[in-house]
Image: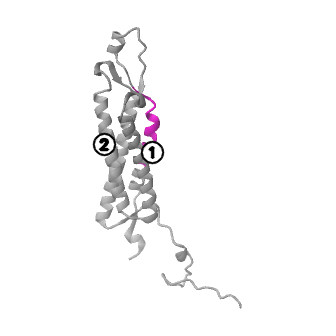
């Protein structure tokens, strides 16, 4: 069998892993945006106080570390698996790695959604700001991209294909074949004068 028949490029898995990595990378700076701020009730109850908005780092005591870990692990795993799959062309890498990245992103998104429904502090006094929605979108994108890579990998394995994350490149030995040489035959070496 020819390599081209048994190997297929999976652009979908490649893009999904890169989207997961990008979402994880962007999640860290998004945590410096304003995530929670005073509600109208808080402003009416405390008109003389300056009630500042809070970033994810300020609002959370543990979830900020979990989200940072989600971003680092998600982006790191996605990039590592993308590189390994690109080098080795093994279908298990996008499938297994996508499931890991998808699982990490799903846990992070579920925890964040729970805190957006039940904001830190008194619920009446807090309102969810734009930064929290950006964080939720990036965490959900990380999860979705990971699960997409896993599904593409699983489908490819079921079909018996090897997923390569880049176009198949000829080897140095195959480039040295002449027009009359048989495939697999070693290139003839020149004899050096003694």
Q: Looking at the picture, does residue 56 appear above or below residue 174? A: above
Highlighted magenta segment, given as a residue range: 18-35
Name the residue at 42% across, 55% down.
14
**Is residue 144 visible in the rendered structure shown here?**
yes
Which quadrant of the rendered structure holds the N terminus?
bottom left
Element assignment for label 2: helix
Tell whether position 23 is magenta: yes
Relative image position of residue 71 (x, y in whole percent): 41, 43
Q: Residues within 10 Å of mark 2 (few under 14, many from 20)?
A: some
The residue sitting at 34% across, 18% down in the picture is 39
Q: How many marks?
A: 2
Q: Is residue 189 left or right of residue 140?
A: right
- Decide which of 99, 6 is in the foreground and name it: 99
Q: Residue furthest top?
A: 48
Residue 109 marker: none
Residue 41 at what x, y percent from top left? 32, 14
| Element marked by disc 1 | helix
The crowding category of the residue bearing disc 1, from other C-alpha atoms within 10 Å (few below 14, some 14 to 19, many at least 20), is some
Visible in this render: residue 19? no
Q: Please tell me which residue is depicted at 30% across the width and 37% down the height of the picture.
A: 111
Residue 123, position as x, y percentages in the image: 29, 22
* Relative height, residue 87 to residue 102 (above, below): below
Question: For residue 31, which quarter of the picture?
Answer: top left
Q: Nearer the viewer, residue 83 or 158?
A: 83
Q: Residue furthest bottom?
A: 194
Number of the front mark, 2 or 1: 2
What distance separates the C-alpha of mark 2 from that of mark 1?
A: 18 Å
Magenta: main secondary structure equals helix
The residue identified by callout 2 is 107
Q: Which residue is mark 1?
A: 22
Q: Against 192, is 92 above or below?
A: above
């Amino acid at each position: 069998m020819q390599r081209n028949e048994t190997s297929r490029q999976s652009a979908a898995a490649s893009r999904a892993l890169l989207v997961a990595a990008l979402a994880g990378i962007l999640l860290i700076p998004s945590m410096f945006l304003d995530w929670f701020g005073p509600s109208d009730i808080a402003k009416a109850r405390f008109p003389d106080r300056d009630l500042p908005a809070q970033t994810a780092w300020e609002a959370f005591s543990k979830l900020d570390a979990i989200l940072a870990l989600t971003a680092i692990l998600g982006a790191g795993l996605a990039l590592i698996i993308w590189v390994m799959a690109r080098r080795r062309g093994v279908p298990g890498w996008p499938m297994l790695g996508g499931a890991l990245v998808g699982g990490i992103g799903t846990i992070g998104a579920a925890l964040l959604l729970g805190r957006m429904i039940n904001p830190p502090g008194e619920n009446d006094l807090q309102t969810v700001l734009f930064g929290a929605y950006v964080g939720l979108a990036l965490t959900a994108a990380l999860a979705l991209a990971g699960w997409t890579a896993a599904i593409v990998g699983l489908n490819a394995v079921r079909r018996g294909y090897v997923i390569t994350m880049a176009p198949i490149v000829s080897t140095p030995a195959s480039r040295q074949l002449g027009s009359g040489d048989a495939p697999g035959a070693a290139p003839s070496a020149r004899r050096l004068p003694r």
